[in-house]
Amino acid sequence: MPKRPSSASDTLYALSNSLMDSLRDSVQAVLGVEKVVHDQEAVARIRQAMMALHGEAGLDHNPHLHRQIASTQDAEGLWYARAELYADLCQLHDETHAVRSLESLLPLFHGSLPSGLLKTRTPGAGARGPSFAGHWFARRRKR
């Protein structure tokens, strides 16, 4: 089939796409939205680290999470999977271990996520020792 000559509508379409891209970039620059390079090698390193933290015990305890981590293809998806990983590590070990484990992942995410997302609260942040919530609730029930 012969190639048809470019029409005015094709030119207009290309121009509008270019203008929209330029406008989007300008708005993101004004709002302070960062462009992040999606490096598949960095995502693979994060994924491997998360799977290592989850370990064999985690695979036996929550195979769904292990599959989710293994199949997630972007850093943002892995970032949000940390909450479930935290919950699993708390059940398998303790809260202190879970918090320290997640904190060890933070350097791996730098450069793969916008800095604003990196400032969001780490699951269990502030917990440096065992949680006293259960103890507090038990005391409240006795009254």
Image (tube, rainbow, N blue to C red):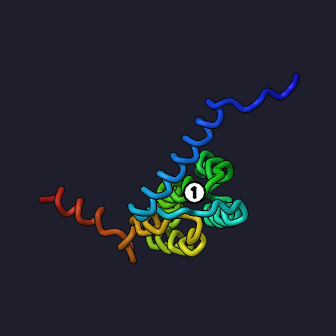
* Label tally: 1
Does the image show residue 51? no
Point out residue 30 in the picture as x, y percentages from the top left corner: 40, 62
Point out residue 85 in the picture as x, y percentages from the top left corner: 53, 58
Point out residue 142 in the picture as x, y percentages from the top left corner: 16, 58
Quadrant of the image occupied by residue 122: bottom left
Instruction: Give the amino acid at mark 1.
Output: Leu
Q: Quadrant of the C terminus?
A: bottom left
Residue in the picture at 62% in, 30% down? 9
Residue in the picture at 23% in, 65% down? 136
Tag 1's secondary structure?
A: helix
Q: Residue furthest top?
A: 1
Quadrant of the image occupied by residue 74: bottom right
Q: Quadrant of the N terminus?
A: top right
Point out residue 124 in the picture as x, y percentages from the top left corner: 40, 66
Foreground residue among 143 and 121: 121
Q: Is 134 above or below relative to 60?
A: below
Does the image show residue 73? yes
Q: Is 17 above or below relative to 45?
A: above
Q: Which residue is mark 1?
A: 78
Q: Residues within 10 Å of mark 1 (few under 14, many from 20)?
A: many
Residue in the picture at 56% in, 53% down? 77
Q: Is residue 43 left or right of residue 133?
A: right
Q: Is residue 7 left or right of residue 141?
A: right
Q: Is 62 above or below relative to 28?
A: above
Q: Residue furthest left?
A: 143
Residue in the picture at 46% in, 70% down? 99
Foreground residue among 134 and 44: 44
Q: Is 126 above or below relative to 113?
A: below
